Image (cartoon, helix red, strand yellow):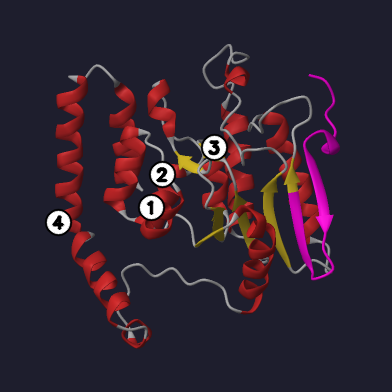
Amino acid sequence: MATIKKEDYIYIEKNPNGVCTIWMDQKNEKINKIGPDLIGLFEEVFEEINNDNSIKAIVLSSKKKDFIAGADIEAFQKVKNIGDWKPISEKGHKILNQIENSKKPIVAAIHGNALGAGLEISLACHARICSNDKSTKMALPEIKLGLLPGGGGTQRLPRLVGLQAALDMMLTGKNIFPYPALKMGLVDKVVHVNALQLAAQKLALEMVSKPIVRERNVLNIETVKAGLPSLQKTLTNIVLEAPLLNKIVFDQAKKMVDKQTHGNYPAPYKIIECVEIG
């Protein structure tokens, strides 16, 4: 394998306000794709940023017309034996956990496509902000290739948007556009593309002192103080995600898959299994 350089994939911009922007810009490619090379570089980049005390927060963004268009499918062709991909997968999960557990807030600034592994990287970030452009869409379309989301999507997505919405996304592979994404909680803000970077930096800095607390099903005094809409949403989530109703949702999802695939398509069953175990 040829030696790769950080500058072939990633450019780091340190802003005067203490926010570091990680620009993804894969050279000689029209789109950014996630493959073993980029996974290795992320480990190096985040270690460098976390050790730099001048950096308070991080924005992850793209110089391309899209955020990240997904995994590098061509990389799978290099796999010859069962288990060959396991070390790469484990390293990928390690990096995603490193992003998720970073003490410095990380905001994904999404414009264009954030698909598959691209969306999964943003799910590991502490917040997501997207442009309102018609080209911006998010999806986990792996099922259309007979695969399942392998970068933590089966675990992080249900915890973010709820069981029903997450299963619907993963079992259909459908696109989610900016304002529906905001309504379901997939993104935290939607702004004009020209305001995306400044808005992402502002949100990242705000989170240094006031992190976003995501307690979907917690009923407390803060929920009550937040007003009636927040209270109604919390109570709805508590009812919809009770264990008994969760079982009903899983049973209905399996029945739907049985009807559509007649048991001949393993991917949706594995997706349901991953979510249910998680």
Q: CA distance from mark 1 to mark 2?
A: 6 Å
Residue ID for mark 4: 244
Do the residues under discs 3 and 1 have CB atoms within 8 angstroms? no
Closer to the eye: label 3 or 1: 1
In contact (CB < 8 Å): disc 1 and disc 2? yes
Q: Is residue 8 left or right of residue 42?
A: right
Tag 1: residue type? Pro
Q: Is residue 177 above or below residue 117?
A: below
Inter-mark Cα distance, 4 to 3: 31 Å
Location of residue 186 (image quadrant): bottom left
**For the residue carrying disc 3, how many other residues have a C-alpha within 10 Å: few (<14), some (14-19), or many (20+)?**
many
Q: Residues within 10 Å of mark 1 (few under 14, many from 20)?
A: few
Magenta stretch contains residue 5: yes
Amino acid type for the residue under numbered disc 2: Ile
| Eye-nearest disc, 1 or 4 | 1
Disc 3 target residue: 117
Q: Name the residue furthest top.
A: 80
Total residue callouts: 4
Element carrying mark 4: helix
Give me the C-alpha separation between circle 3 and circle 2: 15 Å
Q: Kindly identify which numbered label has been placed on residue 180.
A: 1
For numbered disc 1, what is the local secondary structure? helix
Q: Which residue is denoted by mark 2 in the rendering?
A: 176
Q: Nearer the viewer, mark 4 or mark 2?
A: 2
Residue sitting at x 18%, y 47%: 249
Specify the segment rendered in magenta: 1-22
Query: Is the residue 149 above or below the residue 262 in the image?
Result: below
